[in-house]
Amino acid sequence: MERDYYAGLADDQLFEAMFTAEDRLPRDAAEELAFRDGLAPYLSQMVMDKQSWLADLPDWWAVVHATYALGLRGGDEAVLPLVAALRWADAFDCDWVTELLPSIFGSVGPSAIPWLTAVARDQAAGWSARDLALRSLASIGLKHPDSYEHVFKVIGERFMDEGEDRLVRQVAGQVLLDFRHPGYRMALIKFAREDWAFKDMDYLYPACLDPEEVEIAFKLGEPELWHYQEDWMHFYDPGEIQRRLKRWTRERLSGAGQPRQVKPPTGGGRVLPLWRTDKGPVEPVDGGSGEGEE
């Protein structure tokens, strides 16, 4: 019934719901957004625009919804906007997006491989953006077995390159370890031993892989793949919406939380998409205001 309600909304009304519902947008609305052909260009424009990631509440949640909707929609047209989302979400520490992007790209599939490979190899990019690209490639390999060999060649290339940034080698190694990739077992153990030797010389050195844990992981043989196959649409489950509402309420009552702080200061000005009116919410939404990034 609710899906029928959102299907009956005009494009501008449905688009407006992203800005007014905050983190309480119903799943039916999110799915309708994803598959409404007329809105696809505007979702893409939103995630590619830097100012969308710097907007104030409640507008800020719209870019999260747009990213999730593009991931659900999929297709080649979603690849470039999602690569832009990777860059912006990483730059502005948007955990609501970065934590789920590997799974989103896994769903989008092999058409994203060339773009993600370029990010993974881009030494001018930050290590965390490259980490996201590597994990996204791994998710594609997991969900699209025909691409598995190719994407792990790219990941292994970053790990084995001794001229590569050590942090990038660490995150590439972690991906290989998560998948228990047999071709890199000995290289991972050797790398982990080097890491701990560096830590012995400098206690501030950020060692990532423990040689004993690497050996145990391969002996047990069970991959740890949950992070590569998460359901980002779980965000819209009623139970998740209530959980967030309780969290924001606790933070306000305790005084511990600031309004969605973990987001950098706004870049000056609201996001003004094609359709913005001064209308209220499309449909009354129960609960309080959503604040905060995880």
Image (cartoon, grey):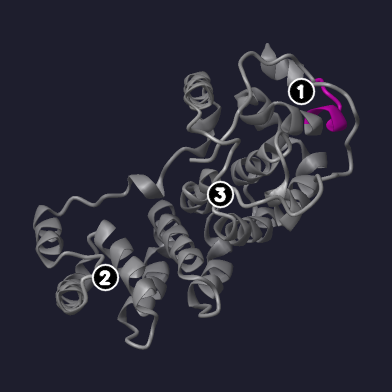
- Distance from Cα at disc 1 to Cα at disc 3: 29 Å
Within 10 angstroms of label 1, few (less than 14), some, or many (20 or more) residues? some
Marked residue nearer the N-terminal end (2 or 1): 1
**Residue carrying label 2:** 204
Q: Secondary structure at mark 3?
A: loop
**Residue carrying label 1:** 7
Within 10 angstroms of label 3, few (less than 14), some, or many (20 or more) residues? many
Within 10 angstroms of label 2, few (less than 14), some, or many (20 or more) residues? few
The amino acid pointed to by label 3 is Cys
Above-or-below relation of 140 to 96: below
The amino acid pointed to by label 1 is Ala
In this rendered view, identify the residue nearer to me: 224 or 204.
Answer: 204
> Is residue 165 located in the magenta-colored stretch of the structure?
no
**Residue carrying label 3:** 94
Q: Residue at x 36, y 72 (%)?
A: 167
Magenta span: chief secondary structure = helix
Q: Is residue 179 visible?
A: no
- Distance from Cα at disc 2 to Cα at disc 3: 27 Å
Q: Residue at x 54, y 25 (%)?
A: 252
Percent of width and height locating residue 134: 43, 65
Magenta region: 7-14
In this rendered view, identify the residue nearer to me: 127 or 236.
Answer: 127
Please say if the residues under marks 2 and 3 sit with CB atoms less than 8 Å apart. Answer: no
Marked residue nearer the N-terminal end (1 or 3): 1
> Is residue 13 located in the magenta-colored stretch of the structure?
yes
Marked residue nearer the N-terminal end (2 or 3): 3
Q: Is residue 261 visible?
A: yes
Q: Residue furthest bottom?
A: 163
